[in-house]
Amino acid sequence: MSAPLFLGLDLSTQALKASLLDEHLAGIDELGVRFDTDLPSYHTTGGVLPSDSELLRGVPDAVGAPVRMYVAAFDLLWERAAARGWEMHRIAAISAAGMQHASVYLAKKALDVLASPDDAAPLGAQLDDAAFSRAIVPNWQDASTRAECAQLTRLAEITCAATAKSVHGRASDVPALSRITGSTAQTRFTAAQIMRFRRDEPDAYANTARIALVSNFVASLLCAGSSVGVAPLDESDACGMNLLDMADGKVQWNESLLALVAGACDAEGRAACDASASASASAELKRKLGTVACDPTQPVGTVGTWLQKRYGLQSSCIVCLSTGDNPATLQCIAPRHGEAVVSLGTSDTAFVPSRTYAPSVEHHTFAHPASLAHAGTNYSLATPPYFLMLVFKNGSLAREWVRDTYCDADWSSFDKSLCRTDACDATGFYWLRPEIIPYDARGVHRFVRDNGDDWTRVESFDDPLANAAAIVMSQCMAIRVRIGQILGDTPLERVYVVGGAAQNRAICSMLADVLGCQVVRPLVSGHDASGERIEYNFTSVGAACRARWVYECSARKKRGESLVSYEETIALARGDTCAYEVAATPRNSSTYAAFESAWRTLEQRALNESV
Ligand code: ADP
Ligand code: XUL
């Protein structure tokens, strides 16, 4: 029997990617399907429909994508993997990551197809329009649900007041919804999205057999042709729904919020219908959502007949719980206390592990994807139970806009502007889509220093290239300020940088200068199938690492041995092969430390002007 291989998938905003690793977690190959270019018939830009697309029906701030595009990408990915000659029979376990919060609405037909697909045909041909109750699914960039967010916030305040509940003794300036679910109300989170769908399209909602996140939807596709049906939600990813009650150290559905989303009560907590109809509306939503699995070592099942017959995977190949793209990235790096991961993908995100449940107005508190704290067993393993995450919506796509508008559509011109700047005399806020931090900030705002602490708002910079330095510096300042709040007195020692923009050295240098610490890029040893050294995608690598862990734990369980922690598994598997390279060391961080307070004032000014 040849040595096992481990596969991680990443269905993110702009692409479906796959990383194939060996048992030492060295790279064997990586593949991708880019939605815009590889699947042009779906007419997406940056993986989503253009804002004037008729399919978005004119809903303000709606951002969505055709759900069938994701299935078509899944089909194409496997075709490409087969064409690359992957040794499918060696794949021992697979896990996926999915863009967070986005949801998929399955009609009864989808469940029938997943239970018994035609193994000779692509899944895209079988999971047709009738298989989904919602053709265009909301993307995490959607901001169309502010009214629903207000209702969730209100109900949480009432619920907390009614029970006089001080969740984990958190300070009262943290809104109740955040104390309960780990996050303030977020337009992109699944609770608000489901609520709007139920209200706007009641028949389609009624016709929905199951609601999945992207992560468990992909896990379900991997299981097509097995008895799994729809895979359970992963605890860490499900924290991004505004629906789980994370207080009191347990993770379970919050019944009040569930009732509001299901239409069983209003935002004041008044029953919307008679008691039995209310109960059945809540129960129906719970059924649609299925279960939340809190033990990531517990496999979902094994690959179904579709992957076995069509591509030659073994019937023993484990399908693991799939998690969100950010939890998967965190899992790949496993940062320590005092370290952070910054992911520069479509969104810019930053995360740090946390031993405590620490809800706040600005960051999200999620269950750690490799923690067994809520698994209901007596494991006492080292992984911290939570991680804290900052999300900035205007990340790469805003940088691309600046590149295309002011820098000859060329990264090297963009980079030159960054290298020229080491002064804080011009800055800007490029909130092209309604921002997440600060909440709902909009528009482009530029400022230049007159002298001293006086700043003037300007329509444009004299030198258009200055926009590149202004956006990147300001994006890095936004991370600096919030990470500083989270870490308090603990110094930030190292930042791991990943995502598409991490390959840009000028951006990494700015990040190191502004954050005042070393910025490193993790490395996956190994090459791709053609022998080339490539940059692996850490989200799909993180998913493959989970697959390696679950495989190890399953083998130990079979031998009657105790489980092993995620970190230990990864360290043992990698041996000495795990490494990172220094992308940048800080040069002039005192400049940015001194600039912090002025920058905060400017951010507030821009925010005041954006409403
Ligand atoms: P996601 O996982 O969200 O789909 P990726 O992590 O693949 O996104 O990142 C894609 C982004 O990476 C692109 O939108 C692009 O702007 C950015 N990117 C790629 N190469 C560079 C570069 N050399 N400099 C800056 N940004 C880059
Ligand atoms: C996280 C978020 C984004 C998406 C990107 O809360 O909304 O980072 O996960 O896919």
Image: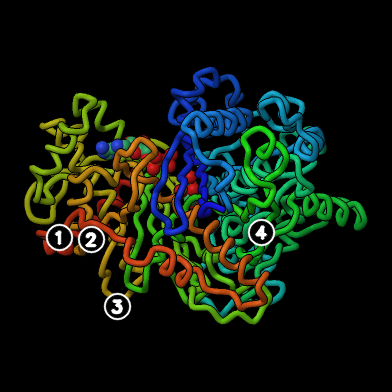
In the rendered structure, which disc, 4 or 1, sits on the residue that comes first in sequence?
4
Q: Position of residue 58 (x, y in %)?
A: 58, 25
Answer whether residue 251 is visible to the viewer in this image: yes
Q: Position of residue 344 (x, y in %)?
A: 34, 47
Q: Amino acid at mark 3?
A: Asp
- Judge from the rendering whether residue 496 lies leftward or rightward of residue 223; answer left or right: left
Disc sitting over residue 489 in the figure? 3
Residue, disc 2: 515
Mark 4 residue crowding within 10 angstroms, few (<14) / some (14–19) / many (20+): many
In the rendered structure, which disc, 1 or 3, sits on the residue that comes first in sequence?
3
Q: Secondary structure at mark 3?
A: loop
User: Do residues under tags 1 and 3 come within 8 Å of each other at their CB atoms?
Assistant: no
Name the quadrant of the C terminus: top left
In the rendered structure, which disc, 4 or 2, sits on the residue that comes first in sequence?
4
In the rendered structure, which disc, 4 or 3, sits on the residue that comes first in sequence?
4
Q: Residue at x 45, y 53 (%)?
A: 22
Q: Residue at x 30, y 67 (%)?
A: 484
Disc sitting over residue 299 in the figure? 4
Mark 2 residue crowding within 10 angstroms, few (<14) / some (14–19) / many (20+): many
Q: Amino acid at mark 2?
A: Leu
Q: Amino acid at mark 4?
A: Pro
Q: Of tags 4 and 2, which is closer to the observer?
A: 4
Position of residue 449 relative to residue 247, above or below, is: above
The reply to whether the residue tagged 4 has its Cβ within 8 angstroms of ligand 2 is no
